[in-house]
Image: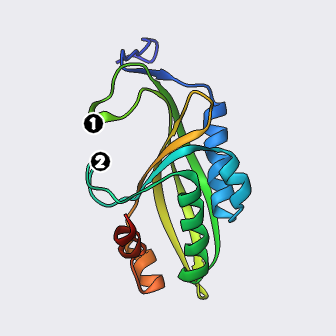
Amino acid sequence: MSNSTPVTNPLFKIAPVEYAMRSERALQHMAHFEFNEWAAMLADNVVYSFPDGDAATRTTLHGKSNLIDRWKNWRQTSGIESMAMGAFNHIPIDVVAHPEGGFPMGIYDIVYFTAKMVFKGQPIGLRMNFSVHFDADNKIDHYATYYDSTVIVRATGKSILEKTKAKN
């Protein structure tokens, strides 16, 4: 295909870059454990899907207070000392046709980045992929995460999902 030929897709179009900026700002608040600032960017009914299973079987957290409480608890119990996110690559899209799998139409930021974490003095690096969906009020109402949690399990000595699955 020639570079001069415009490419179109009837399922989506490119979304404004400000959604990528919002998504990244929210992820930075999460990484810096700035829970009030992060919560202000979330819809009350936000859903956070962990990277296990498929769309029907993934471990999920429902609701802003549940998500924020879970992150506060994880910070206290995991041994994490710090987290930084960088090397962001964003693909903001506006899904204009009904996607499969029961996902909503609207604005998504597909973002991949590097997370650098320190657990009990042990630094780890991990490439992560997130799908961030925005509601009509420009609040984040869904995170779908995709990453290999093996390095986190090795660093902490436990899976963060075991306790989460028991609660859901």
Look at the numbered disc 2 and give the secondary structure of its residue.
loop
Picture quarter with the N terminus = top left
Q: Residue at x 64, y 62 (%)?
A: 31
Report the side of 27 relative to 53 (left or right). right
Q: Residues within 10 Å of mark 1 (few under 14, many from 20)?
A: few
Quadrant in the picture for the C terminus: bottom left
Numbered label attached to residue 55: 2
Residue 47 drawn at (x, y percent): 46, 49
Q: Earlier in the sequence, mark 1 or mark 2?
A: 2
| Frontmost residue, 48 versus 15 | 48
SS at mark 1? helix
Quickly name the residue at label 1: 101
x, y (%) of residue 120? 59, 88
**What x and y, as percent, mark residue 32?**
69, 64
Name the amino acid, label 2.
Ala
Q: Given contact means CB atoms under 8 Å apart, are the residues at marks 1 and 2 in contact?
A: yes
Measuring 47% from the left and 60% from the top, which residue is drawn there?
127
Give the amino acid type for the residue marked by disc 1 in the picture: Gly
Mark 1–mark 2 Cα distance, whole angstroms, equals 7 Å
